[in-house]
Image: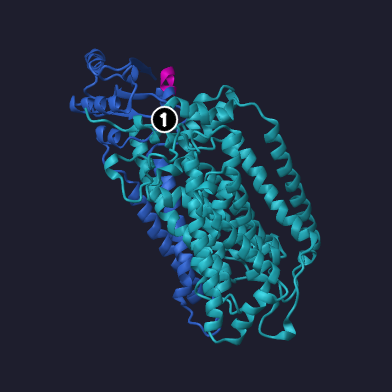
Amino acid sequence: MQQGPEERTILQDVPWPDEPPVMAPGQTFGSVTDTIADAVLTRPIGLGWLFGLFVGMTLLGVLMAAVTYLFLVGVGIWGIEVPVAWGFAIINFVWWIGIGHAGTLISAILLLLKQTWRNSINRFAEAMTLFAVACAGMFPLLHMGRPWLAYWMFPYPSSMGVWPQFRSPLVWDVFAVSTYATISAVFWYVGLVPDLATMREKAKHPLTRKIYGLLGMGWRGSARHWKNYEALYILLAGIATPLVLSVHTVVSFDFAVAIMPGWHTTIFPPYFVAGAIYSGFAMVLVLAIPIRKYYHLEGMITMRHLQNSAKIMLATGLIVAYGYAFEAFIAFYSGSTYERFMMENRWFGQYAFFYWMLILCNILIPQVLWFPKVRAKTGWLFLISLVILVGMWLERFVIIVTSLSRDYLPSSWGHYTPTRWDYAVFFGTIGLFTTAMFIFIRIMPAISIFEMRTLLPEAEVETK
Amino acid sequence: MSHAQLAPPIYGLLAEFDTATDLVYATKAAYAAGYRKMDAYSPFPIEEASEAVGFHKSRVPLIVLLGGILGGASGYGLQYWINCISYPLNIGGKPYQSWPAFIVPTFELTILFAGLCGVFGMFALNGLPMPHHPLFNVDRFSLVTRDKFFLCVEAADPKFDMEDTERFMQSLEPVSISEVPH
């Protein structure tokens, strides 16, 4: 957003002379507008895009089939069984919603911190949030067994006279996730309105003009409108910041409020939030690296963005590592036999392989990000991001499955094996996410045009 | 002017500028010359421009605050009413009004109401959606969503006079001046 030189803070991301810039030199208001809008309006549909959409829609088809069968037969087609009743559905829920968090962090928290480099990645990061939350939100519904009764979770005056149990973290989750989805959607839309007006004016086809015109609400860039707009934008960022921190905190309460060994711990909220941002930035890089290359947006999503994201991953990854270390420490320090057994079981039990893979993916491999040479290579960043995404998925797997399969009573111990339907739904949501992202970058400006204009030196009002 | 009571034949006069700086100084000059019914138009937010048209304080923050208070109060009120009045239920011996547990939905509803009130309030204050506006009758005005800056002095301004105002706007050295038909 707009800011004068006197507002520079110590947090300001000012590049050193030999560091890559936030925007390639030589851009003007017009060239920024054209580069971003033409990627949607005039660029022909390419084979690469079609192939990506094809892969996404194939997996989406798998999701539709898997969900149809699930509705016909019930959750018995999944591998969940007492004692491990949570399984893939909750692992995927936590994983997806965590990925969404980076979008809000970029759009809201970095805005408040005046990190203007965010202006070229916030739009698609917010879209990523929306689609990730859509994928996440599906899992608790599917997991309910009778998803058509999902409205029972909301407090409404029903003829049965009963209400949701407000002392349960699962009900808190309903409020946290639905508020998060709503606020993310309006934040994204409000940010889009001035750009939709740009698209309206640039579109050639009358129907396209009409659609963008309707969505753009007749935005005309009035100074009075901008003033109200900016006031709202900064306030939305201000309320989205505690919101995003609350969402993964509440998700962690689903575990921490329960008394399972390995779950009942106060480290969960901060470590869940850090893990969420960690995986979210990994997803941002997984999306940004191909998008900038394919759409030739290297001048706007520069190496600086990728390197800054890598540094954030490094920092949040260390917080997550601290979380793992403290979990282990407390398990022994607590003096509780059950907690100690939980930890030993994670290390050497039937799921030990996944625990050590998680340590490898989330802690050991990402340490190579300390090297500036690695941060300067998009290929490496892409690979490490994928590794982190796998690691964060494994983290949720380990937390859920090891604790549930080995609780207090050996008589209730069990084993969890996911079925092909578990995998079908999981990869199906990846298909839903991919499809939505591919359609989004084809029909909406993937970079915020008006915020990019404010980054240009000409946007400053000089004193005459 | 003999036909002062009639509706003005045009919406206003529109001057085009190339830079944000020119726009802000032109707007300041127009304000100093006594024009009030006018607006500056730009492709991105310019803080100085809203100051120059004399729009100093947005009411959006107040709406967000009221929305937040309403959301928080109704969130807690809902849980209180459900648990203490409508259907009191003993859950594990906990008090009916388990306020620490009620904080989470209260907080979420505070955010939800504040955000939604802010968004609807912002659009309402701006009079949007308004897909048709006299300014869109000027072809050049479409560049306001790209790289040009405009100042429109509206004919509804008491000080507006076709010749005087046009002469005044010429003195601001705009790229061009056009009449905005209704």
Give chain B's shade. Answer: blue
Quarter holding residue B55 = top left
Quarter holding residue A91 = bottom right
Q: Is residue B137 magenta?
A: yes
Residue B158 appears left or right of A217: left
Q: Which residue: 53% across, 33% down?
A: A214
Q: Which residue is mark 1?
A: A220
Quarter holding residue A19 = top left
How far across and down, in percent of the image, does residue A373 sit?
52, 47
Q: Is residue A96 magenta?
A: no
Nearest the camera: A177 or A263?
A263
Q: Which residue: 76% across, 44% down?
A: A58
Give the secondary structure at mark 1. loop
Nearest the camera: A217 or A234?
A234
Residue stretch in magenta: B136-142
Quadrant the C terminus of chain A occupies: top left
Quadrant the N terminus of chain A occupies: top left
Callout 1 amino acid: Arg
Give chain A's shade. Answer: cyan
Indicate whether A319 appears above or below A374: below
